[in-house]
Every structure is written in C-alpha cells, then in structure tokens.
Amino acid sequence: LKYAMTLDGKIATTTGHSAWVTNPLARSEVHQLRAACDAVVVGGNTVRQDNPQLTSHQSGLHNPLRVVMSRNLNLPEVAHLWETAQAPTLVLTAASANPDFQVLLRKKGVEVVELTPLSPSRVMAYLYERGFSSILWECGGILAAAAIAEGAVQKICAFIAPKVIGGSNAPTPVGDLGFTNMTEALTLERVKVRVVGSDCLIEGYLPEKI
C-alpha cells in the first residue's frame, strides 16, 4: 500500500483536490515503485477524483497492469486509464454490473472481468492466478482499510509532506478499521525512514496476524 499525505494526515483537501501532496523527487520514486510492480490497484473513487495514469512516466521503465475495482461501474466514460496504448487496464466489477458500460470499456481495449465477491482478498487471489505477484495498492482510504483488514496488504510505503491543510472532512489514507483502543493499532515491523527531498518516506511491514 502506497500513499502520500500531509503532516496532518490528509491525502487531499475537503474538495478532493490532491495535486500535488509530495514533491517531484518523491513522485519520481513512486514512478519507480510502480515500475517494479506487476499491477497497480485503485478503486472507482480514485478514477473519478484524480483521473490517474498509473504509469511509470519514464521511457524504458516497465508499466504495470492497471487494475480498477468498481462494484457498480459508475465511472467516467473518458479517463486516462481507458487509454491502453501505453499500459493495459483491467476493470474488476460485480456480476452483471452496468452491461452497457462494460461494452464501452471493451471497445476501448479495456479488459473487464466480473468477480464474486468483489473484495481485496479475492482480487489478490485472482491476480495471483494470472501470474501477477507484486501488487501495489494506490487506492483511497475506504479501499485501503478493506485491503488491510482482509490481509491483502503486507507492506506500507507512506510519503509524508511538510504541509498542513486541515479540514475535519478531508480524506485520510486509511478508513475505518473498527479499532477503538490505541492498543489495537497495527505497529509496523522492519521500519525504514528516509528523507526524499523535503518529504519523508516511512516503509514498514504489517504484522502477519491482523
């Protein structure tokens, strides 16, 4: 799981604007991180809010399979992820979801697969079956929390920028995990801390049993 947040723990403003939280050097590291992965996973909210490309942005570097999880396929008809000349895109959705939009995506060269249940653990199993073993989650807080809760995330890479934007409703990198006591907090192991330009990168592994 990779995310970038401000010093006060926000991944975007209250309006959803997030370009850019981190500095160019940190973003370049993210591009290299993507290049080292087999697939990158986002949810529908990320597609709607950010319209990401999810490529390595550098010639000569590997572009991973771009995976979108969307239960209802309430996605924009035009998006960078539907442009498949540079990198392939796979949309995973629920059974019988929005057949017309499925047709539209396939005409654009996007692969659409219905999964039951459409959950992070099922997605990981499906991707592994297809030979994708190194998966990078670049999703928003709700999907990130589900991925952590289901054991679909082993490592966290958190870029922290020395910025404060405030906002009680501004989105955070990880949604509700159901914890009520600090003793329940997930403490990362084998932690590394590194300065990247003006930002800070904290990397660590989640405990095996969550």
Image (cartoon, rainbow, N blue to C red):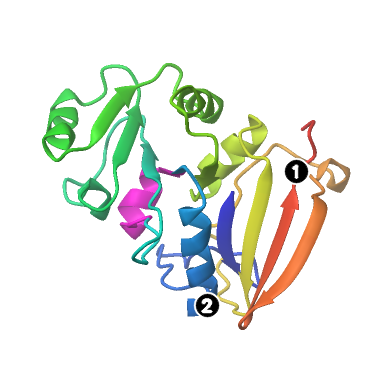
- Which sits earlier in the primary sequence, circle 1 or circle 2? 2
The x and y percentages for residue 137 are 52, 46
The image quarter containing residue 89 is top left
Mark 1 → mark 2, Cα distance in angstroms: 26 Å
Q: Amino acid at mark 2?
A: Leu
**Residue 25 vertical position relative to residue 77 in the rendered view, above or below:** below
For the point 61% across and 34% down, which residue is it? 152
Q: Nearer the viewer, residue 196 or 7?
A: 196
Question: Badge 2: few (under 14), some or many (20 or more) residues near its Cα, within 10 Å?
Answer: few
Q: Which residue matches tag 1?
A: 206
Q: Nearer the viewer, residue 168 or 61?
A: 61
For the point 77% across and 33% down, which residue is it? 210
Q: Which residue matches tag 2?
A: 25
The x and y percentages for residue 194 are 72, 71
For the point 60% across and 77% down, which residue is it? 164
Looking at the rendering, the stretch of residues picked out in magenta corresponds to: 40-54
Count numbered badges in the picture: 2
Q: Amino acid at mark 1?
A: Leu
Between marks 1 and 2 in the image, the one whose residue lies nearer the viewer: 2
The x and y percentages for residue 144 are 56, 43
Element class at badge 1: loop
The x and y percentages for residue 128 are 51, 27
Residue 170 appearing in the image: no
From this viewpoint, which residue is outermost toward the bottom?
Answer: 198
From this viewpoint, which residue is outermost toward the right?
Answer: 183
Residue 56 appearing in the image: yes
For the point 29% across and 43% down, which residue is it? 88
**Residue 27 vertical position relative to residue 162 in the rendered view, above or below:** above
